[in-house]
């Protein structure tokens, strides 16, 4: 009786070992492979060479593409709560640019997604775009006049050197002896402006133009000041 009991235990152990080995060799997807279907998503080509151009509460976005099946591009911002769509055509020649208006001042993360005529889409391409507004406007200043000299009928306006990275030029407006209003644009690296035909009883006005970045699409101007 004891021998039969031991034989039964031995057979049970062997069965368990075989079961464990079989379980260890079972493919990982054995229990769910019937639920897996071959991928049927079709991806469209992504945009490339994305460049952004900051402006005053707006910005431009340009890109290139090589997939001829692309029919339109959607640009998302504000955590994809806002977007705009640009339709592509043969005249675009595999590059395009869109202007987006009404953007709050600050930096914005964009996502560009392409689509074909069947609604298939590409993976998103991320880009950073900036816009400027009242905060930048409040921060810029006019160029400072050092002094005004008169010699031999020539009125000279001397400017203090301005090291501001955003200053581009200063616009000076005066009335000539012929009673005609004239404008002189003075680059930031020019420190002296001569006026040979100033109508002496008329005022001289000036303001400065600032560009937030070299690639910006909008300039910002200071208020006019008067040289008496």
Image (spheres, rainbow, N blue to C red):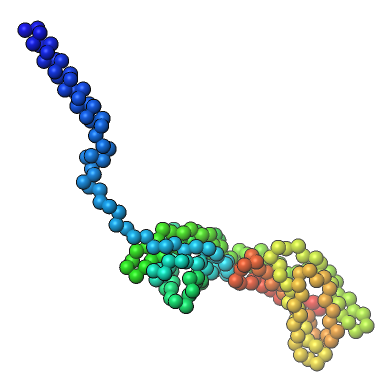
Residue at 42% x, 69% y is: 68
Q: Quadrant of the N terminus?
A: top left
Identity of the residue furthest to the right in this view: 152
Residue at 47% x, 78% y is: 91
**Whether residue 212 can be seen here:** no
User: Taking 155 as reference, is 134 left or right?
Assistant: left
Q: How many marks?
A: 0
Q: Quadrant of the C terminus?
A: bottom right
The x and y percentages for residue 96 are 49, 71
User: Taking 157 as reference, is 105 left or right?
Assistant: left
- 51 to 154, vertically: above or below: above
User: Taking 54 as reference, is 77 left or right?
Assistant: left
Q: Nearer the viewer, residue 186 or 147?
A: 186
Residue at 88% x, 82% y is: 154
- 21 to 94, vertically: above or below: above
Identity of the residue furthest to the bottom in this view: 178
**Whether residue 62 can be seen here:** yes
Identity of the residue furthest to the top in this view: 2
- 111 to 217, vertically: above or below: above
Q: Nearer the viewer, residue 157 or 68?
A: 68
User: Taking 32 as reference, is 81 left or right?
Assistant: right
The x and y percentages for residue 149 are 89, 76
Q: Quadrant of residue 191?
A: bottom right
Residue at 78% x, 80% y is: 204
The x and y percentages for residue 221 are 66, 72
The x and y percentages for residue 20 are 22, 26
């Amino acid at each position: 009786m004891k021998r039969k009991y031991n034989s039964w235990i031995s057979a049970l152990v062997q069965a368990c070992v075989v079961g464990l080995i079989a379980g260890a060799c079972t493919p990982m997807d054995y229990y769910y492979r019937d639920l897996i279907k071959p991928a049927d998503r079709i991806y469209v080509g992504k945009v490339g060479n994305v460049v952004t151009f900051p402006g005053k509460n707006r910005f431009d976005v340009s890109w290139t593409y090589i997939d001829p099946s692309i029919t339109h591009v959607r640009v998302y911002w504000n955590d994809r709560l806002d977007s705009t769509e640009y339709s592509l055509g043969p005249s675009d020649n595999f590059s395009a640019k869109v202007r987006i208006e009404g953007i709050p001042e600050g930096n914005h993360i964009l996502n560009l997604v392409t689509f074909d005529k069947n609604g298939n889409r590409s993976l998103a391409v991320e880009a950073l775009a900036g816009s400027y507004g009242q905060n930048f406007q409040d921060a810029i200043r006019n160029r400072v006049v050092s002094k005004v000299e008169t010699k031999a009928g020539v009125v000279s306006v001397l400017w203090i050197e301005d090291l501001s990275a955003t200053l581009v030029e200063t616009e000076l407006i005066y009335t000539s002896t012929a009673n005609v209003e004239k404008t002189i644009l003075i680059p930031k690296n020019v420190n002296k402006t001569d006026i040979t035909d100033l109508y002496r009883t008329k005022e001289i006005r000036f303001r400065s133009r600032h560009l937030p970045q070299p690639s910006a699409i909008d300039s910002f101007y200071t208020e006019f000041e008067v040289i008496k």
